[in-house]
């Protein structure tokens, strides 16, 4: 806990418990004891901006502005860390295995879901991989659905505009092909090429709620999202993913999120890549 005297706003244990319970109920994200400081520092900004005296006032404000403020609360405390080609072996697997099979099948159709896409680096990396691997991808029927709970990160994702610091490490050939440099701003920015953007639809979606998704999906990325979910929530989610995948569809998880015996419906191919194997 923060030493009392250093805090700008009074933030009691009761305040912390009250707020983290709301977040867990809405998102499935568990906040352990050590998240007290994170909650305080992220939400103190909000309390300040609203001109409130302390966190007990914030709780009252939240209760009387539930619909709008709950979004601000969740946006403030979720972790949105991401990067282009994070865990690159997943993109190599798409390039070396999934897409060659798809090209052979010849139906020229792909349905992909990036679930918990944060600021968009993940779905754009998928789109780049498709464009690099499928020579005639413009003639294919490709839809990448990219969803997140957090409306703020989604807004950023759909603009496709990134600071230079975010594209460090991307190969020059990719930068040249998929980004347009904009030097008109104080800090140079890079815009994703519209032809890549056209492949992606960004939508707000809470993974714990109903999913308005009708097509069967070839592969789902749900990486570094369920890490803070409890086991029951995670198992239910993985089961629903299986229902939405094609017969031999794939599920990609984050590096510390193995399904370890939690699903009979998938087989592990290695490096947190799973293939549906229940015949449904
Ligand atoms: C750490 S980021 C991961 C981004 C990307 N998948 C990656 O691995 O680089 C986790 C994202 O999951 C989202 N998230 C957390 N709980 C969610 C839920 N219940 N429904 C939808 N998105 C959620 C957060 O808003 C955040 O943007």
Image (cartoon, helix red, strand yellow):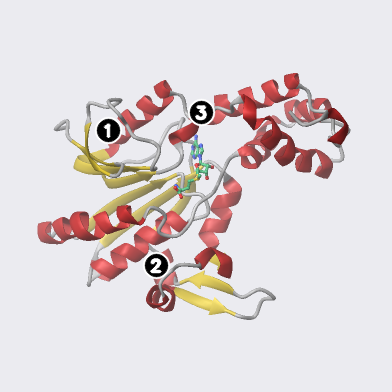
Q: Nearer the viewer, mark 1 or mark 3?
A: 3
Image quadrant where residue 162 sits: bottom right
Instruction: Say which residue label 1 marks.
Output: 243
Query: Residue reaching furthest front?
Result: 3
The quarter of the rendered structure image containing the C terminus is top left
**Badge 3 or badge 2: first in the primary sequence:** 3
Asked if the residues shown at circle 1 and circle 3 are in contact, with their CB atoms under 8 angstroms apart, the answer is no
Q: Secondary structure at mark 2?
A: helix
Instruction: Say which residue label 3 marks.
Output: 28
Is 39 located above or below residue 96 in the figure?
above
Q: Residues within 10 Å of mark 2 (few under 14, many from 20)?
A: many
Give the tally of numbered discs: 3
**Badge 2 or badge 1: first in the primary sequence:** 2
Q: Position of residue 241 (x, y in %)?
A: 32, 35
Q: Position of residue 128 (x, y in %)?
A: 36, 65
* Residue 163 seen in the current view: no
Q: Which mark is residue 196?
A: 2
Query: Residue reaching furthest top?
Result: 14
Asked if the residues shown at circle 3 and circle 2 are in contact, with their CB atoms under 8 angstroms apart, the answer is no
Q: Residues within 10 Å of mark 1 (few under 14, many from 20)?
A: some
Q: Is residue 105 rendered to the left or right of residue 68? A: left
Asked if the residues shown at circle 2 and circle 1 are in contact, with their CB atoms under 8 angstroms apart, the answer is no
Q: Secondary structure at mark 1?
A: helix
The quarter of the rendered structure image containing the N terminus is top right
Tell me if the residue at label 3 has its CB under 8 Å from ligand 1. yes
Q: Nearer the viewer, mark 3 or mark 2?
A: 3
Residue at mark 1 to residue at mark 3: CA–CA distance: 20 Å
Image quadrant where residue 110 sits: bottom left
């Amino acid at each position: 806990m923060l030493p009392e005297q250093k805090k700008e706003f009074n933030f009691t244990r009761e305040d912390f418990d009250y707020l983290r319970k709301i977040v867990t109920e809405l998102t499935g994200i568990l906040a352990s004891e050590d998240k007290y400081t994170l909650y305080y520092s992220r939400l103190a900004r909000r309390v300040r901006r609203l001109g409130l005296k302390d966190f007990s006032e914030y709780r009252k404000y939240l209760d009387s502005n539930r619909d709008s403020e709950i979004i601000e609360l969740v946006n403030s405390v979720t972790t949105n860390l991401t990067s282009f080609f994070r865990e690159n072996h997943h993109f190599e697997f798409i390039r070396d295995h999934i897409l060659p099979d798809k090209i052979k099948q010849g139906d020229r159709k792909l349905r992909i879901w990036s679930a918990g896409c944060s600021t968009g680096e993940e779905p754009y990396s998928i789109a780049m991989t498709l464009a690099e691997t499928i020579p005639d991808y413009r003639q294919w029927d490709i839809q990448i659905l990219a969803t997140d709970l957090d409306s703020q990160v989604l807004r950023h994702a759909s603009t496709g505009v990134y600071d230079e610091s975010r594209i460090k490490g991307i190969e020059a050939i990719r930068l040249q092909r998929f980004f347009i440099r904009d030097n008109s701003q104080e800090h140079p920015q890079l815009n994703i090429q519209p032809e890549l953007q056209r492949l992606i639809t960004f939508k707000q979606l809470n993974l714990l709620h109903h999913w308005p998704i009708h097509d069967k999906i070839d592969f789902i990325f749900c990486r570094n999202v369920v890490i803070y979910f409890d086991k029951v929530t995670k198992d239910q989610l993985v089961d629903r993913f299986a229902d939405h995948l094609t017969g031999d569809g794939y599920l990609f998880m984050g590096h510390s999120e193995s399904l370890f015996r939690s699903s009979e419906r998938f087989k592990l191919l290695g490096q947190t890549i799973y293939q549906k194997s229940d015949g449904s």
